[in-house]
Amino acid sequence: MAREKTALSIRELTVGGLFSALIAAGAFIKITLPTEPVPMHFTLQWFFVLLAGLLLDKKLAGTSVGVYLLLGLIGIPVFASGGGPSYLIRPTFGYLLGFAVAAYTMAWLCEQLRTSGFMNLLMVSVAGLLIYYGIGVFYYFVVCRMIISREVTWQILLFNCFLLTVGPDFGLCIGAVSVAAKLRNVVKRTLGR
C-alpha cells in the first residue's frame, strides 16, 4: 500500500507562496464601494484565488489561500482594509474565508474531472463563486446581527453583498478560466505531475 505524500516539495512551497503573494497583491487593486454598514471592496484577489483553484491540487490550493489568511490575521496588512485579528469581526471577513473553501473545492473538482476544457473549468469556477459568495453573505449577516448589532435586511444582503460585485467577479471567472486553460499543463510539469 502506497503512503500518501504529506510534506510539500520545494517547488510546491514556492508555487504556493507565489499564489499567496498574488492574492495579497490583488487586495491592493481595488474599487471601494460606499455601502452600509461597512464599505465593500471589489478586488483582484478573487482572480488569483480562481487561478489557485484551477491550477493547483486541492492541498496546495487550500494551503496557499490559508497562508494568505494567516498572514493577514497575524497583522500583516494584506487584506483590502489592512489586517490583524480584529478582522475576524468585520462583516466582510466571510468572503476571505470563502476564498479558502472555494479554492480547495475548485481544485478538488478539477481533480475529479476527466477533461479540463473551457466549459468544464468555467463550471468549476462558478461553483467556487457560489461557495465564496455563500460563505461571505452568511458571515456578513451573522456578524452584523450578532456582533455589531445592526439590522440587516435581505434587500441589503442581496444588493450590497451579492449584486454589486457578482457580475465583475463572474467576469474574473471567465478571465481566470481563459488563463488557466493555457497554463494547466505548464503548472503540472513545473510541479512534476
Image: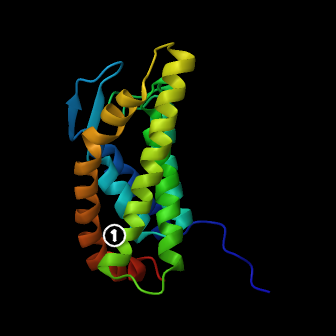
Visual colour scheme: rainbow
In the displayed structure image, the side of residue 3 where residue 122 appears, left or right: left
Residue in the image at 31% along x and 72% along y? 180
Up-down: is 113 above or below 42?
A: below
In the displayed structure image, the side of residue 10 where residue 37 appears, left or right: left
Q: Nearer the viewer, residue 125 or 111?
A: 125
Residue 29, given in percent of the width and then of the height, sits at 21, 41
Residue in the image at 29% along x and 61% along y? 173
Residue 78, given in percent of the width and then of the height, sits at 36, 36
Q: Nearer the viewer, residue 160 or 102?
A: 160
Residue at the spot of label 1:
122
Residue 110, given in percent of the width and then of the height, sits at 47, 74
Does dot 1 land on a helix, a strand or a loop?
helix
Residue 40, given in percent of the width and then of the height, sits at 30, 30
- Amino acid type of disc 1? Leu
Q: Nearer the viewer, residue 17 or 56?
A: 56
Q: Nearer the viewer, residue 142 or 15?
A: 142
